[in-house]
Image (cartoon, rainbow, N blue to C red):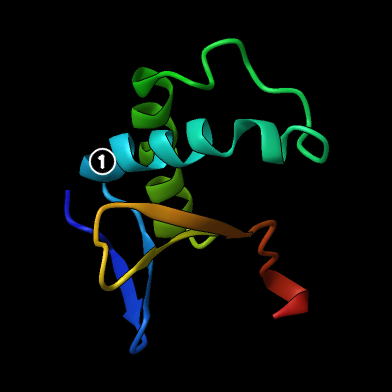
């Protein structure tokens, strides 16, 4: 499954990850585990596993396809394949609010 959305600037690439990006996303959360811990909600016991992120990225894509959410990750253009950040836009509401 290729990335469904990718935006680039001169320094960064913002993307909705494909299944093949699961190892890089897992690496990001492993590298930043201590840094993110004080502000993150409790995580499932398998959060820091590749299997968890493969399932999660499939769900992210389904949410994007159904226009429910957009979960982006960032990488430096000079260092593709190393995720350096994440940003989620969620709870899209359609109908009378649109």
Above or below, 16 against 18 in this view is below
Residue 67: x and y in percent read: 50, 62
Front residue (pair 80, 87): 80
**Quadrant of res 95:** bottom right
Instruction: Farthest residue to the top: give it.
Output: 45
Residue at coordinates 60% horizontally, 10% vertically from top-left? 45
| Location of the C terminus (image quadrant) | bottom right
Above or below, 64 against 77 in this view is above
Residue 83: x and y in percent read: 40, 53
Q: Is residue 82 left or right of residue 3?
A: right
Residue at coordinates 66% horizontally, 63% vertically from top-left? 92
Front residue (pair 33, 93): 33
Instruction: Farthest residue to the bottom: give it.
Output: 10
Residue 54: x and y in percent read: 33, 30
**Quadrant of res 51:** top left
Residue at coordinates 33% horizontally, 52% vertically from top-left? 82
Above or below, 34 against 25 in this view is above
Residue 35: x and y in percent read: 69, 40
Instruction: Farthest residue to the right: give it.
Output: 38
Say few, some or many: other residues with alpha carbon within 10 Å of mark 1 (under 14 / 14 to 19 / 20 or more).
some
Residue 24 in view here: yes
Residue 69 in view here: no
| Secondary structure of residue under mark 1 | helix
Q: Is residue 93 left or right of residue 59?
A: right
Front residue (pair 92, 85): 85
Q: How many marks?
A: 1
| Residue holding disc 1 | 19
Above or below, 63 against 55 in this view is below
Residue at coordinates 70% horizontally, 40% vertically from top-left? 36
């Amino acid at each position: 499954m290729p990335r469904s959305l990718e935006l680039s600037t001169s320094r960064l690439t913002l993307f909705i990850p494909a299944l093949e990006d699961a190892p890089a996303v897992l690496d990001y959360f492993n590298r930043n585990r201590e840094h993110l811990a004080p502000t993150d909600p409790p995580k499932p016991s398998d959060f820091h596993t590749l299997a968890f992120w493969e399932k999660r990225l499939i769900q992210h894509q389904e949410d994007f396809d159904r226009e429910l959410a957009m979960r982006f990750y960032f990488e430096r253009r000079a260092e593709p394949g190393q995720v350096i950040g994440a940003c989620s836009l969620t709870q899209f509401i359609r109908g009378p609010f649109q």
